[in-house]
Image: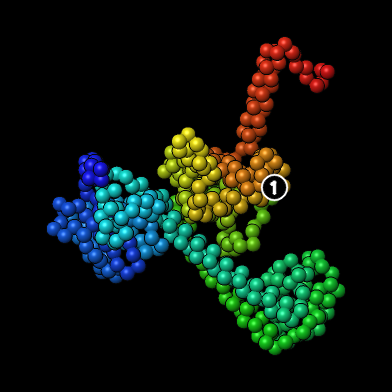
Amino acid sequence: MAKQSQRRCDQLPVLHPDAAGIDVGASELFVAVGADRDPQPVRRFPTFTQDLHALADWLQRCGVRSVAMESTSVYWIPIYQILEARGLEVCLVNAQHVKNVPGRKTDVSECQWLQYLHSVGLLRASFRPPGAICAVRALWRHRGSLVQMAAEHIMHIQKALDQMNLQVHRVLTEITGLSGLRILDSILAGERDPVTLARLCHKRVKSSESTVAKSLEGDYRPEHIFALRQSLAAYRYYQQLVLETDQEIQRQMVELDAADNALAKMPKRTKRLPYQRQGHEPRVFDLRRELYRIFGVDLTNVPGISAMTSQTILCEVGMDVSRFRNASAFASWLGLCPEKKISGGKVLFTKSRRVRSRVAIALRLAARSLHHAKDYMGEFFRRICRKLGKPQAITATAHKLARIVYHLLSTREAYDESVFHKCEEEALKRAEMRLRRQAAHLGFRIIPAEEG
C-alpha cells in the first residue's frame, strides 16, 4: 500500500521543473536541485558570504529559476537577498506547511522534500513587501526594541525612587516628563529640600506644590542615588538612539514614492476630536502627514487608528494591497477570521487562527480603544461585547477595521462613516418589512408607535 502511494506521488505533474529547495540553518545550508540538473543534486554550503555567492552561481549553472526555503528565524534573509539580486524567484514558505510529513527529519531529506513540493506546485509563498518597505520595516522594528529598553530603565528609575521612599513618580503623571526630569536632575545635583524640588514643577502639573513636596521626603541613600543616576543616563542614551533612528526612518520614507491622488495640503479631519500625538510618536517629522503622502488617504480618520498604527500597516503590508484578492483574504491573512474545521460532519474548531502579525496586534489594540467611542465603531464594539463578550468583540471589531483599511488603500477614498449609517437604515427597513410580512401571515397588522 505504501509503494502504491509513493508511485502516485511520483506521477504528479511537475509544474516547476527549474525548482530548487534550501534547508536553512545558522551555520550551513543544504540545497537540492532536480536529479537531472547535476551529478550531485544535493550539496552543502556554509553561510559565509562568498559561499552564498558560490551557491547562487551553482544554481544558475543548473538552470534553476525558482527556489523554495523556509522562514527560519533571520537566517534566511542573507541568502534571500543574494538570490533575489541574481534574478531568481525565491519562494519563502511557512515551516508549518511542510512539517506535517513524518520521516523527513534530516537536512538532506528536508531540502529534497522542499524541492519536490515546490516542483509540483504544492507550496505557497509567504507575503513579503517590496525592498524599500522592508528597509523601513527593519528600522521601525529596531525602534520598537529601543523604546522597550528605554521603558525598562524607566522602571529602574521608579525602583530606585521606591527604595528611597520618594513617591514623586506616583504624584506626577509621567516621571520622564518635563517636571519629572527637572526634579531628578536636581536630586542628582545634590538638592534635598522638598519645597525647592517641588517648585521645579511646571504650572500645568495637577498636583499641588505641597503634595509634590510631601512626596519628595525620603531616605536619600548613596547606593540608590548611584542606581538612579545610571538608570537616568541609560534612559537618555536610548532616547538619543530613538531620535537617531527617527532621522533614519525619515530619510528612508522620503525616498518612497508619493501616491498619485495625494494633495499638497492634507484634507480636514472627519473625527470630532483633534489629532493628538502619542508619546512614542517620532518627533523629528510629522508622521501623519508623511503617511498621507505615501498612502494617498488619511488612515487616522478611521476610529481607533493612530499614526503609529498606520505606520505599522505601512511597514508590514506596504502601499499596495492588490496582492490580496479581496478584503476577506486580507482579514484571513491577518488571522482575524474564524477558521471552521469540520470532520465527519462535526465542527471541531471555529475560532480564529493564531497568527503572529504585528498588524493584527495593532488592529486589536485599536479595537480595544473604541470601548467609549461615540461613533459607529464604538457602538459596534459595545453591541458585540454585550452579545458575545469582550474577547470576541475585539476580534470582530479588528476584523471590521481590517476591511476598512483594505477598502481605503485599494480605492484611495477618504473614510466616510455615513456609509455605515445608511447600511443600518437599510437593515432596519428590511427588518420592518420582514416583521410586517410575518404579522400579515398570522392575521395581524403592525401599527407604528406614533400612530398608536
Residue 196 position, x and y percent, is 81, 80
Residue 170 x/y as whole percent:
76, 70
* 230 and 31: which is toward the camera: 31
Query: Type of residue at label 1?
Result: His
Q: Nearer the viewer, residue 182 or 160?
A: 160
**Disc 1, SS:** loop
The quadrant of the picture occupied by the C terminus is: top right
Q: Which x, y percent locates residue 91? A: 33, 51
Q: Is residue 390 left or right of residue 201?
A: left
> Which of the pair 316/37 is nearer the observer?
37
Residue 261 lies, with reference to residue 74, above or below; the image says above
> Which residue is painted at 64% across and 76% down in the image?
156
* Residue at figure coordinates x 78%, y 82% from the top left: 218
User: Residue 267, located in which quarter of the rendered image?
Assistant: top right
Which residue occupies the extreme right position in the image?
210
| Spot occupied by residue 133 in the image (x, y as percentages of width and height) | 44, 55
Q: Is residue 341 visible?
A: yes
Q: Quadrant of residue 47?
A: bottom left
Where is mark 1, residue-wise?
A: 371
Corner quadrant of residue 178:
bottom right
Image quadrant in which the N terminus is located: top left
Which residue occupies 81% across, 73% down?
Answer: 212
Kindly tell me whether residue 296 is visible in this rendering: no
**Residue nearest the viewer, comparing 388 with 145:** 388
